[in-house]
Image (cartoon, helix red, strand yellow):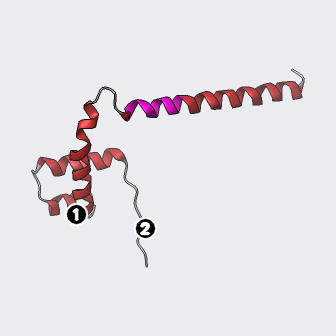
Amino acid sequence: MSKKRRNHSAEFKAKVALAASKGNKTLSELTEQYGVHPNQITQWKRQLLENASQLFQKNGNSQTKPDEAIKDLHAKIGQLTVENDFLSKALGH
C-alpha cells in the first residue's frame, strides 16, 4: 500500500526550518514533534539558509509575482466586463 503524499504550507515549512536552525532540539525531536521525515527537515533548513538573503533584497524577484497577479486580475476584470455587457444586451437592459 502506498503512502499518500502530504503537501505542507510554506508557513509550516518555515516554522520547521526555523526550529531546526535554532538548534535547541535534535533532529529526532523535531521529527517527532512535527511528524516530518528527518531528511525533509534537513532539506527545508538548507533551503532557508540558502535563500534567506533574498528576503532583504530591494529589487529581488518578489516584485514580479505581484505584477503577474495584477495582470491576471486585469484580464479577469476585462473578461467579466465583456460577459456582463453581453448578458445585459441579451436580457434587453
Secondary element type, mark 1: helix
What residue is shown with label 1? 38
Closer to the camera, 26 or 51? 51
Q: Residue furthest bottom?
A: 1
- From which residue to which does the magenta span run? 62-70
**Which secondary structure type mostly characterizes the magenta part of the structure?**
helix
- 48, above or below 60, in the image: below
Q: Is residue 74 left or right of residue 9?
A: right
The quarter of the rendered structure image containing the C terminus is: top right
The image quadrant that residue 40 belongs to is bottom left
Residue 58 is situated, as x and y percent measured from the top left of the image, at 30, 26
Closer to the camera, 79 or 50? 50
Q: Residues within 10 Å of mark 2 (few under 14, many from 20)?
A: few
Q: Is residue 78 left or right of residue 93?
A: left
Q: Is residue 31 left or right of residue 72?
A: left
- Residue 4 numbered tag: 2
Callout 1–callout 2 Cβ contact below 8 Å: no
The image quadrant that residue 52 belongs to is top left
